[in-house]
């Protein structure tokens, strides 16, 4: 993507500039490299928010641009977290076990160390044996590959079966939700190999980084999240531009007509579905080490519904709208559910925002759908229209943006 593409898409330039300035500002205000005005916990919150913006872009690509209302994309987000979480938990536990057994009179064998690691990790579910899904947990690069491969293959298989059967609309949404529910229910079982309801914990402790404080680790993850968001935004902008972008918009607006024109609708939909699943998984792989824990509740269908709400509030069909929606809802949610918003005493009833936040979010979604279908991102359309030059004279072409008579004579 060259300078011509950047010139053609000024919102991309604006986004890059805002993200760079924001990243530098947080760095200079952090406890690790700056004044310390921002706490480490808040830097982690911002890093997680950038990861949520990343998965929101994935949702916007598949829903806002291609017209596939997926209610299962947060499952891919969670799978990415599980894949990297297995390595983090294994490597961290191995260091602890090796350190505790080093004082023994006889040096432990590799089998004894492996058994001790298994007991530490799976003792909570009454087991000490490593399940087959942990066969690559000792390898960082293998698990990084699985972050992409597991969600990607799942999306490929599911998408191929669904799209070749030409399942569309609400039926496809129900299928994606069913897939997510089935995956969550499976992970809740203790014999799933991923510790059931306990999930994977202690992910914020990087193996071999005991001497490094969390303020440095948090800002490093923040940088990685910002870099991933920037790269994802550029990829998404490239995908929706040109002929490919026109085709997927056509599929969204009139799938039958695009198929009649000779395009492989199923192929385009499958490509976007798999690509967005991988993007979501990468976001999860960056999110959960900052959150410190992941369990099957993170993959529940309600999470994917929230994701659709974020994109709708921000403005679907606009990449920056998805980012705005995710960032806005995430930060407002942190304010209302983190105990920072004061309760309102009405005398006969006390409004506790921790309990009422989901109601407020649902009401916001309804209001946006009814009165502002373009979402928060639509505000920029209003500004752009006001800043656009006033055009007078008869149009010299058939479309609405054609050159006008007065402009041609100037």
Image: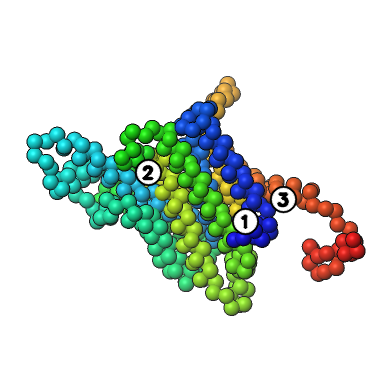
Residue 163 in sight from this viewpoint = yes
Residue 198 figure quarter: top left
Give the residue displayed 37% in from the left and 44% down from the top.
294
Q: Which residue is mark 3?
A: 381
| Mark 1: secondary structure | loop
The numbered mark, 1 or 3, whose residue comes first in the sequence reads: 1
Q: For the view shown, which residue lies furthest in the top direction?
A: 347
- Please give the label number shown on residue 317: 1
Mark pair 3, 2: CA separation: 38 Å
Q: For the view shown, which residue lies furthest in the left direction?
A: 106
| Mark 2: secondary structure | strand
Check contact, mark 1 vs mark 3: CB within 8 A.
Answer: no
Q: Position of residue 26 (x, y in %)?
A: 54, 36
Q: Position of residue 380 (x, y in %)?
A: 70, 48
Q: Position of residue 187 (x, y in %)?
A: 33, 50
Question: On screen, 401 above or below 210?
Answer: below
Question: On screen, 345 above or below 146?
Answer: above
Describe residue 1's horizontal placement relative to residue 43 as left or right.
right
| Mark 3: secondary structure | helix
Q: Position of residue 62 (x, y in %)?
A: 54, 59
Check contact, mark 1 vs mark 2: CB within 8 A.
Answer: no
Q: Which residue is mark 2?
A: 294
Q: Nearer the viewer, residue 274 or 165?
A: 274
Mark pair 1, 2: CA separation: 30 Å
User: Which quarter of the image is occupied by the C terminus?
Assistant: bottom right
The numbered mark, 3 or 2, whose residue comes first in the sequence reads: 2
Give the residue displayed 44% in from the left and 69% down from the top.
160
How crowded pointer 1 is (Cα within 10 Å; few <14, some 14-19, many 20+) is rated as: many
Q: Nearer the viewer, residue 288 or 409?
A: 409
């Amino acid at each position: 993507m060259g300078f011509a593409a950047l010139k053609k898409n000024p919102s991309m330039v604006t986004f890059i500039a805002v993200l760079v300035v924001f990243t530098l500002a947080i760095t200079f205000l952090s406890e690790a490299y700056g004044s310390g005005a921002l706490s480490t916990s808040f830097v982690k919150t911002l890093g997680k928010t950038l990861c949520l913006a990343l998965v929101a872009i994935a949702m916007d690509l598949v829903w806002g641009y291609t017209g596939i209302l997926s209610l299962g994309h947060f499952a891919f987000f969670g799978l990415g977290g599980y894949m990297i979480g297995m390595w983090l938990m294994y490597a961290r536990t191995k260091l602890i076990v090796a350190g505790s057994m080093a004082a023994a009179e006889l040096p432990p064998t590799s089998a004894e160390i492996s058994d001790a690691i298994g007991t530490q990790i799976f003792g909570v579910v009454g087991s000490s044996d490593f399940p087959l899904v942990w066969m690559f947990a000792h390898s960082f690069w293998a698990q990084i590959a699985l972050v992409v491969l597991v969600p990607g293959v799942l999306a490929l298989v599911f998408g191929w079966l669904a799209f070749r059967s030409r399942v569309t609309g609400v039926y496809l949404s129900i299928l994606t939700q069913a897939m997510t529910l089935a995956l969550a229910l499976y992970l809740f079982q203790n014999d799933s190999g991923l510790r059931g309801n306990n999930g994977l914990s202690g992910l914020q402790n990087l193996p071999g980084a005991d001497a490094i404080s969390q303020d440095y680790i948090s800002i490093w993850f923040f940088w990685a999240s910002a870099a991933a968001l920037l790269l994802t935004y550029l990829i998404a902008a490239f995908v929706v531009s040109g002929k490919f972008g026109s085709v997927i918009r056509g599929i969204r607006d009139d799938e039958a007509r695009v198929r009649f024109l000779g395009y492989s609708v199923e192929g385009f939909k499958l490509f976007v579905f798999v690509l967005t699943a991988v993007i979501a998984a990468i976001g999860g792989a960056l999110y959960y080490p900052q959150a410190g824990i992941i369990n099957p509740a993170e993959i529940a269908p309600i999470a994917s519904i929230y994701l659709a709400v974020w994109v709708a509030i921000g403005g679907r069909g606009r990449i920056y709208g998805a980012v705005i929606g995710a960032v806005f809802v995430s930060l407002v949610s942190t304010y209302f559910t983190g105990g920072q918003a004061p309760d309102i005493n009405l005398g006969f009833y006390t409004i506790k925002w921790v309990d009422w936040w989901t109601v407020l979010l649902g009401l916001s979604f309804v209001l946006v759908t009814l009165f502002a279908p373009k979402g928060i991102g639509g505000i920029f359309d209003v500004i752009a229209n006001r800043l656009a030059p006033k055009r007078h004279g008869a149009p010299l072409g058939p479309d609405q943006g054609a050159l006008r008579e007065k402009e041609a004579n100037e």
